[in-house]
C-alpha cells in the first residue's frame, strides 16, 4: 500500500505559506543581516553552507539586504573567493538548478578576509568591513557569526569577537542583534563542554548561542513530532504498554576519508552519539511540549536526557559494544581496514562502530530498551528509527511453516528515501488462512512531489529569524556528555576486550553487536526483506 493524495502539487518547502516553524509562519526574514563564516575556505562552506544560502536566495528567502563575509587563513581576495563559491554552487548536488541571474547577485554579496583566528589584525579588518557594509545599507548591526572551524578555535574566536566589540551581549532589536552558530562537536567530553559553555557565556547570553546539529534540520526528524502528536491513532500507543523496544541506526558505507586526524581523536562515540543519536532518541521519547517553540520543545527533550538510566562502568560490557573495521568488500569492491587509512596509526584502538543499549526511567518508557548503533564501512548507508511493538497476547490461527508472524513495527526513514512505513500482518489471498508481512509506506518524494529544503537551509533561516527550536541548549549538551562520560572514562583507560579490528568492511559490525540484542531475545533490522508483491 502507498499513501496517496488527490491532485498532488509540487511544493517548495522553503517558501510554502503556512509552513510552521517554531510556532510562526516561515517567511522571509525582515531584518537585514551580515553572515560571517569563520573557516570559509573549508569543506563545510563549499559543500553545505554556500549551496544552502544560494537555494534560499533562489526561493527569495534571504533578507532583502544580506551580505556574507568569509574569514579564513587561506589567502584569497573577494574575486577568487567568489569564483570558488560559484564553482561550489555549480558542482553541488544540493544546490537548486543553476540560475545565472540569481547566482550572480548572490555571488556579488560575498566578501573575504584572509586572517588567522587568533590574531588581532583579522578582527580589525572584519570590524571595518562590517561597518562598511552596514553603513552602505543604512542598517542596524544585525550580525550572524558561523563557526565552521576546528572545535579547538571556538572559545578563542568568541573571545576575540568580544574583545573587538564585534558582538553585543544580550537580545536587542532596535539597535541590532548578534547570534553565533557553533558547529559540533561542542566539547570533547563533559569537562570541556562545561568549560566551553562558561567561556562563551562570558561574552554571549545563552539566547544568542545556536549550537547546530544538522540532523535536527532534516524533514523526517522534524516530522517525528507531527507523526506522534498530530495523529490520534499513534500517540495513545507510543509508550511502554505497547512498544517492545526502539532501534536507532546510523550506518555509513564510507570510511574516514579525509577526516582521519579528527576521527583518531574523536572516534564513533563522540562523533555520532553525543549529538545525532541522542538527539534522535530524545525526539522519539519526549513528552508533548506546550507549544512548538524553542523553550518548550527543548525543555521536553532535555527531560528525556535527564531520565536516561546512568551507565554503570562495572557492567559496561552488558550494554555497549565497540568495534573497528578491517579489510573487506563493499559494493563488489575491496575496502581497506581502518588502520590502513591515510593518517591512521597502524596500532590504533579508535572505535569506528558502537552499539549501545540505553533505558529511559520515566512513566512512558520504563523497561523499554533503546538500542543505538552507528558505524563506518557497514553494509549499507542508512539512517532510520525502528519502533517495534509487542506481540499480541494470543494467536488463534492454525499456522503452517510458511506463515510469517512478526510483531508490528514502524520505521522512520531519515536516509535514504525519507519517509515512514508501517509493517503489519495480513491474510494471503486464497481459501485458507495464511499470513504474510505487508508494508504501508509513506514517502516524502512520492507523496508531496516536494522540493525539500536541505537541513542547513532550514537551520540557517531559523537562526536569521532568531528561532532556537532546532538548536541545542547548554544544559542538554552537557547532559548528553554526562550520559556517555562513564563509557569514555573506561575506554580511555583500557583496551578493547576483543582485539581490533573485529569486523570486516561491508558487514553489519562485530558479532558482539548482534549478541547484545540476542541476549534480550531481539535482533537488529539488518537488510529487512521488502514487502511481498501484491
Image (tube, grey):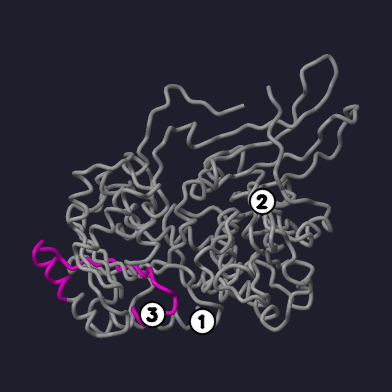
Please tell me which of labels 3 and 2 falls first in the chain: 3
Circle 3 sits on which residue? 201
Task: Report the disc number at residue 370.
Answer: none
Q: Is residue 374 magenta?
A: no
Left or right: residue 303 compared with residue 195: right
Circle 2 sits on which residue? 379
Secondary element type, mark 3: helix
- On the image, the x and y values in percent for residue 198 come to 43, 82
Q: Residues within 10 Å of mark 1 (few under 14, many from 20)?
A: some
Give the foreground label among 3 and 2: 2
Instruction: Write the start and end of the magenta stretch as one range.
Output: 128-157
Question: In the image, what residue occupies the spot 50% across and 63% down?
Answer: 299
Task: Report the disc number at residue 192.
Answer: 1
- On the image, the x and y values in percent for residue 79 come to 19, 62
In depth, the one of 388 and 302 nearer the eye is 388
Please tell me which of labels 2 and 1 falls first in the chain: 1
Left or right: residue 166 compared with residue 345: left
Question: In the image, what residue occupies the spot 21% across and 43% down?
Answer: 100
Q: Is residue 235 above or below residue 32?
A: above
Amino acid at each position: 500500500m502507498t499513501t496517496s493524495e488527490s491532485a498532488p502539487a509540487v511544493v517548495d518547502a522553503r517558501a510554502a505559506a503556512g509552513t510552521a516553524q517554531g510556532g510562526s509562519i516561515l517567511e522571509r526574514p525582515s531584518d537585514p543581516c551580515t553572515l560571517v563564516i569563520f573557516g570559509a575556505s573549508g569543506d563545510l562552506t563549499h559543500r553545505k553552507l554556500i549551496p544552502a544560502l544560494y537555494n534560499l536566495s533562489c526561493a527569495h528567502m534571504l533578507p532583502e539586504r544580506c551580505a556574507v563575509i568569509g574569514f579564513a587563513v587561506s589567502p584569497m581576495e573577494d574575486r577568487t573567493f567568489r569564483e570558488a563559491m560559484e564553482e561550489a554552487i555549480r558542482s553541488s548536488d544540493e544546490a537548486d538548478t543553476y540560475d545565472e541571474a540569481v547566482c550572480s547577485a548572490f555571488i556579488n554579496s560575498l566578501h573575504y578576509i584572509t586572517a588567522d583566528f587568533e590574531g588581532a589584525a583579522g578582527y580589525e579588518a572584519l570590524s571595518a568591513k562590517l561597518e562598511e557594509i552596514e553603513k552602505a545599507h543604512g542598517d542596524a548591526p544585525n550580525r550572524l557569526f558561523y563557526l565552521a572551524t576546528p572545535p579547538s578555535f571556538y572559545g578563542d574566536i568568541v573571545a576575540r569577537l568580544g574583545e573587538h566589540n564585534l558582538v553585543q551581549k544580550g537580545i536587542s532589536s532596535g539597535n541590532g542583534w548578534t547570534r553565533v552558530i557553533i558547529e559540533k562537536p561542542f566539547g570533547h567530553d563533559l569537562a570541556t563542554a562545561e568549560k566551553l559553555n562558561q567561556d562563551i557565556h562570558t561574552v554571549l547570553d545563552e539566547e544568542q548561542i545556536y549550537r547546530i546539529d544538522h540532523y535536527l534540520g532534516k524533514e523526517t526528524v522534524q516530522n517525528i513530532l507531527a507523526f506522534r502528536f498530530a495523529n490520534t491513532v499513534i500517540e495513545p500507543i507510543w509508550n511502554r504498554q505497547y512498544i517492545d523496544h526502539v532501534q536507532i541506526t546510523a550506518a555509513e558505507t564510507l570510511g574516514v576519508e579525509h577526516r582521519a586526524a579528527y576521527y583518531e581523536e574523536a572516534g564513533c562515540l563522540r562523533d555520532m552519539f553525543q549529538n545525532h543519536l541522542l538527539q534522535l532518541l530524545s525526539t522519539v521519547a519526549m513528552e508533548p511540549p506546550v507549544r512548538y517553540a524553542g523553550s518548550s520543545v527543548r525543555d521536553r527533550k532535555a527531560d528525556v536526557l535527564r531520565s536516561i538510566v546512568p551507565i554503570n562502568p562495572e557492567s559496561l560490557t552488558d550494554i555497549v559494544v565497540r568495534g573497528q573495521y578491517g579489510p573487506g568488500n563493499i559494493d563488489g569492491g575491496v575496502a581497506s581496514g581502518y588502520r590502513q587509512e591515510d593518517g591512521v596509526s597502524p596500532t590504533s584502538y579508535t572505535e569506528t562502530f558502537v552499539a549501545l543499549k540505553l533505558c529511559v526511567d520515566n512513566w512512558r518508557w520504563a523497561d523499554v530498551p533503546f538500542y543505538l548503533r552507528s558505524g563506518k564501512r557497514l553494509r549499507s548507508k542508512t539512517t532510520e528509527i525502528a519502533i517495534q511493538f509487542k506481540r499480541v497476547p494470543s494467536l488463534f490461527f492454525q499456522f503452517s511453516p510458511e506463515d510469517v508472524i512478526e510483531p508490528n513495527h514502524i520505521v522512520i526513514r531519515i536516509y535514504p528515501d525519507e519517509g515512514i512505513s508501517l509493517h503489519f500482518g495480513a491474510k494471503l489471498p486464497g481459501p485458507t488462512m495464511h499470513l504474510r508481512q505487508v508494508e504501508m509506506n509513506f514517502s516524502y518524494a512520492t507523496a508531496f512531489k516536494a522540493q525539500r529544503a536541505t537541513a542547513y537551509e532550514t537551520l540557517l533561516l531559523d537562526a536569521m529569524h532568531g528561532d532556537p527550536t532546532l538548536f541545542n541548549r547548554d544544559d542538554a549538551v552537557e547532559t548528553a556528555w554526562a550520559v556517555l562520560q562513564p563509557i569514555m572514562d573506561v575506554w580511555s583507560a583500557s583496551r578493547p576486550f576483543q582485539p581490533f579490528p573485529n569486523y570486516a568492511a561491508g558487514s553489519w559490525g562485530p558479532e558482539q553487536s548482534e549478541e547484545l540484542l540476542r541476549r534480550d531475545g531481539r535482533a537488529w533490522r539488518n537488510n529487512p526483506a521488502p514487502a511481498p508483491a501484491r
